[in-house]
Image (cartoon, rainbow, N blue to C red):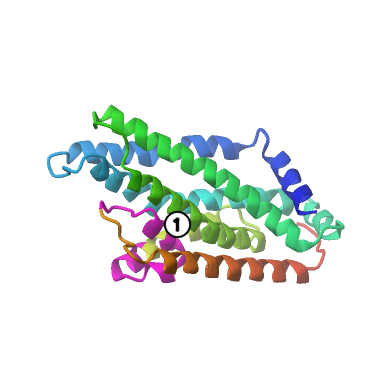
Amino acid sequence: MLLRCIKAENMKLKHSIIWSACILIPIIPAVMGTANYLNNVGLLTEEWYSLWTQFTLFYSWLFYAPLIALYCSYLWRLEHLNSNWNVLMTAPVPVRDVFLGKLAVIFRVTVFTQIWVFLLFAICGKLCGLPGMMPADTMLWMLRGTLAAAAIGTLQLLLSMVIRSFAVPIGIALAGCIFGFLFVNKGWGLYWPYSLMMVGMNANKSEDALGGELIPFLVSVAVFFTAFAAAAVTWLGKKDVKAQA
């Protein structure tokens, strides 16, 4: 049944605005980060690593979480319109599979986004005249940032399920990033879900901020993912059919 739910959610994404957002929005932080690097190239002397600091400064701190939130809001928006919610709640499908099906699709789109962002990083690096290939470290950091999306995606999918507004969950994600910045600066990045992508992607740092804390990072992602998924499935299982405005 879960596979059928995933297939149904994938069908909803065909010809949707999500793919345009996935391609176009990451270009903004890419341009901002590259311009910032070029304007400070005299101070930023570590080539690929320096470009990475500027690239992730804007992407992971301002765009990554809100972009995931946009995906989640769009996927639930279809259910909140007209009488689609009533149809969903009366369908012979376990609510667990409904939520996990949407989550699987969100993670798929996020993985695509991350691959595209990494390609943008490579393209911008070559346009800046950087020699050789990207350091292997940056691939690891991108992978860790992608894993962190499991926690953020689950939380945002929960928020978009409960909140019928399209924009409010995206605003919450942006606010979460601001607080996430403060948590990272305090050294508490593993204790706030919106900080995990910053810590995972080694945002604005050329040396690995996690160091030997990869296991605590993975545990934190797993704990947040489990907690938010359990809360979402519990809420959805108790939600009655209701009239839509």
In which quadrant is the C terminus drawn?
Answer: bottom right
Counting labels gives: 1
Which residue is the extreme one toward the left?
A: 42
Q: Is residue 166 left or right of residue 128?
A: right
Q: Is residue 140 left or right of residue 35?
A: right
In the rendered image, which quarter is residue 98 located in?
bottom right
In which quadrant is the N terminus drawn?
Answer: bottom right
In the rendered image, which quarter is residue 181 located in?
bottom left
Residue 67 horizontal/vertical position (percent) = 50, 48
185 drawn magenta: yes
> Viewer-proximal residue, 71 or 227?
227
> Viewer-proximal residue, 102 or 213?
213
Given the image, on which type of amino acid does mark 1 rest? Answer: Leu
Residue 49's place in the image compared with 88, above or below, is: above
Magenta segment boundaries in residue numbering? 181-206
Residue under pointer 1 = 174
Q: Residue at x 32, y 38 (%)?
A: 134
Q: Residue at x 49, y 68 (%)?
A: 219
Residue 114's place in the image compared with 213, above or below, is: above
Q: Is residue 9 left or right of residue 138?
A: right
61 drawn magenta: no
Q: Is residue 108 left or right of residue 206?
A: right
> Viewer-proximal residue, 124 or 235?
124
Residue 148 horizontal/vertical position (percent) = 48, 58
Can the viewer see residue 81?
no
